Image (spheres, rainbow, N blue to C red):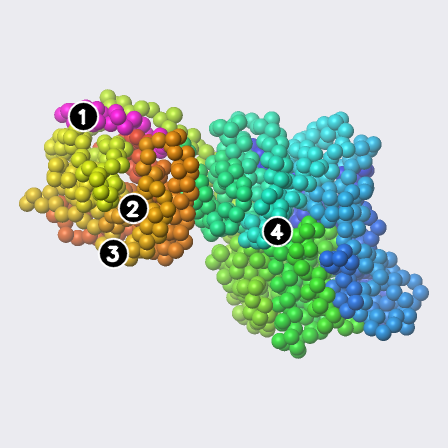
Amino acid sequence: MSSLRHHRVIIASLFLPNTAVLGDSAPPTPDESGLQTPGFANPGSRQPLLGRAAGPLRSIVEDLRDKTRNPTPSMTPRGETANPFASFPGPTLPSGNTITGAAAAAAAAESLIDALSNKLTGGGSKTPGASGAASPASNAGRQYQTTHHGSSAGQPRVQRRASRSSGQRTKSRSLSSSRRDPLSHSQKYHFESNPHCNGGLKNAVESVGDRLKRKLWVGTLGTNTDGFRESLRRSMEWRMREERDSVPVWIPDSEFASCYDEFCHQVLWPALHYAVPDAPKTKSFYESAAFKQYVAVNQRFADAIVSSYQEGDIIWINDYHLMLLPQMLRDRLPGAPIGFFMHVAFPSSEIFRCLSVREDLLKGVLGADLIGFQTANYARHFRQTVSRILAAEALPKGIQLEHRFIDVGVFPMGIDVGSLTQKKRDPEVAEWVNSLRQRYAGMKLIVGRDKLDVIQGVRQKILAFEAFLDKYPEYQGKVVLIQVALQTTEENEAQGGVADVVSHLNSRFSTLTYQPVVFLHTQDLTFNQYLALLTVADAFMVTSLREGMALRAHEFVECQEKRHRPLILSEFTGSYSFSGFRSCIPINPWDKRGTAKAIHQALTMSDQEATSRWEDLHNHVVTQTAQAFVTSFLVRCLRSNLEHMQSDAISVAELDVGRVLPRYRHSQKRLLLIDFEGTLWQRDMRTIARNAGVAGSPSFEPPKEAIDVLSKLAEDPKNEVWLLSGLPVKGSLEIVAEKAPNVGIVAENGCFIKPRPDRGGKANWISMVANFNLTWKAPCLEILQYFTERTPGSFIEEREASVVWRFWTEKTVEDHASDWQWARRQAAEAQNHIFDSLGERYGLRIIPGSTSFLVLPNNISRSTAVGAILHPGGPARSAATHSVSWLAPEVTEDTDTEFDFVFAVGKDEKLMRRLNELDNAETCSTGVKGTDAKWKLDPDQVLPALQRIAETK
């Protein structure tokens, strides 16, 4: 972390952590600087929660109404009850009306018992925000089941959100429409916490504290800004820069709305979470004109960052809203350290390829030095998607492009445990805990916190809870599900389909004093109240259909340090993919019966088992912290940038043989590793075609100059000369072995090794894949034959332990542009089929090239073959060895050697990086890509350089 003290970090996120609000300053809050989850109401002036007038026992809602504080709203104050437990309109039905009828309890957290209690304690006067219902006699029939007429009951949420604006806007419940309208005639403004910002990111950055003093946030205010005067904007820019370390990005309201509401929420968000809609139901997904606005928003961010960038800054770009930004910045700031972190899930290539702008998005992200994901699965999906759509080489550690390498890593996000622990000690949290326990005495509480869209699986949660009440009727009236609802767009909430299932469930199980489901909005709930809910909960339930990291589950675990109640967690969350969270109760949210059993298991779990599970969860949470997330990502980003800058081919010096010769001349034991194809010999496609069985092609004839120089080098008793090749033994390298018998040969990219002859003059080929399962070749050849029949000029090159498909054999592309595009598309499809059907089952890897791709076993490469050569028991050290112990993977990764001079020339970057770990190694790259080698050399200069070395005595 000390390395970051010398760098400023520019953090780009769609929304700034703080926003500017027109008007006089809001009253100060006692814990403004503490842990605060955006979206929750900010606590205002504190009032005692204990103490109340004596009288008959009242309902939980009535009791909490008296105990609540007046929250300081995060937006313009509005006329509504301040108690989040008092009344709540609930989810809105598709028609726009709130839930009524038998669904009383879901539409409001208030029951008729309140009205009855008021009559018993005085009858005439009403507590602010209390029920406006008349006496029960005035209601006819089954009126006891209807929604009570509190201050906000029956009021659609569109009005609730519109009332937050000081001006009249569209009635859309989208986030952009909830960006407050400015009063352009007013120049007074103050700063508040931005309810739309990425709360996990904000808390993570703040958790690092003084160790990251120099930072600059870049993002939008989350308000409508078209009405802001230029002078007001300049004033806000100056104050936010000085007071909040922030730079606001000014985006026209219509442009932002189109980008965020249409493209981000209706196109990107569903695709990233495996929810590709069916056409023509959502035509915008396939023909989204909003992508132009998405590009424009990213460009505005790029302009803001470039104008603020200083040499040495680290640029950290966050989430799917800004996927084009890395490449935009790379074009204008070529040497800047740029990191991109995807906070949400990333789907398989089969889903992502449905996007019409898939290539633009991928190329945009690949402008970064480091790309981070929450889980290893998401990172793997990204690498495979890039490989299949862009035909780039995907390696375990990242993506190899033509001129640079991009690191791809896993950085699981966590919470600030220390800050949360401090927040839990607030006396008000304890008071709310006591109130909740008093009012829900004898009942079990299940708590959840989700957006009401399709992805979060709230509908599945409600259906499972209903199945639980049906299967275990003894719990009817004894278990309450309290669902905290996060803000989302109107379209997403309507698609979520929560309202109807809540209405149905509550119509079945509600009574005068019991409602099975209670909804609360985060805007109406202070963070202290939320922590109290997590503390008293008997179970916490996450039913996401797909999610990055469920940090709310981490918060629940830490709030249960005394009670140790279980966590019910969807298998499709990023949190579940980590071993520490396997002690939860896993569920498939699509299986409502299985989820119902999980609820029963959680409520009946013994204290001993619950404690054991909680300890495992707690140990993971305190290890996977927010601080570890921030520091590991930024340090890795900085290191990646430094490595990429150092490995830039332009900055690598051309091989100076004169500087290498002194070490060569004074060494006693030398190892020379020389690539064949592309270094000593340029591929002849006709010869390769003949080896693949194509009639009329000439036989393989190795170049005489190359054989002569290899033989001359091998004549020196101090030299061990090895030829590294991807060609097969039969028909190719066996000819080389005959003409240069004293040269060791690595064939098929490490699948076979021919050592130097022993004293008897024998040198048998040794298989590095003797213990590998090669039955994958038959189905692989069958797949490739299918694509060969559909790709003119392509052919399959079958080798002993690997397969190559050459999909392009023409020398030029310009004259056959359409054929070239078709061939590349077919190659991507073929790689996709092979990996999905055979890759994971047989442990295969696919190495794409410009006109071909190679399929071979996972743990085989030229690098592993060289590792075996370097081993004391390997063929380079003992020609008469009969043991194959040196073939073990742990041995082939060893780089210790007794050679006092190692020289390698070729294009294999993995081998170059490995040999660079040796102090006595000289590495030289003949490729055009960025390289980690110490030297570079054009292929046509390799032979003259080797001849000069061979002539040295």
Residue type at mark 3 is Asn
Q: Earlier in the sequence, mark 2 or mark 1?
A: 2
Left or right: where 485 falls relative to 610: right
**Tag 1 residue:** 947
Left or right: where 524 falls relative to 938: right
Left or right: where 220 falls relative to 676: right
- Check the image and report above or below for 82 versus 317: below
Q: Distance between the residues labelled 4 and 1?
A: 68 Å
What residue do we see at 22% from left, 47% from top? 752
Task: Identify the mark at residue 796; answer none if there is no mark.
Answer: 2
Residue type at mark 2 is Ile
- Is 329 magenta? The answer is no
**Tag 3 residue:** 771
Q: How far apart are marks 4 and 3 (CA)?
A: 52 Å
Along the line of sight, the residue nearer the viewer: 224 or 61: 224
Residue type at mark 4 is Pro
Task: Give the mark toward the camera: 4 or 3.
Answer: 4
Q: How far apart are marks 3 and 2 (CA)?
A: 25 Å
Task: Give the mark toward the camera: 4 or 1.
Answer: 4
Q: What element carries label 2?
A: strand
The boundaries of the magenta stretch are 928-953
| Residue 598 coordinates in the image, percent (x, y) | 57, 69
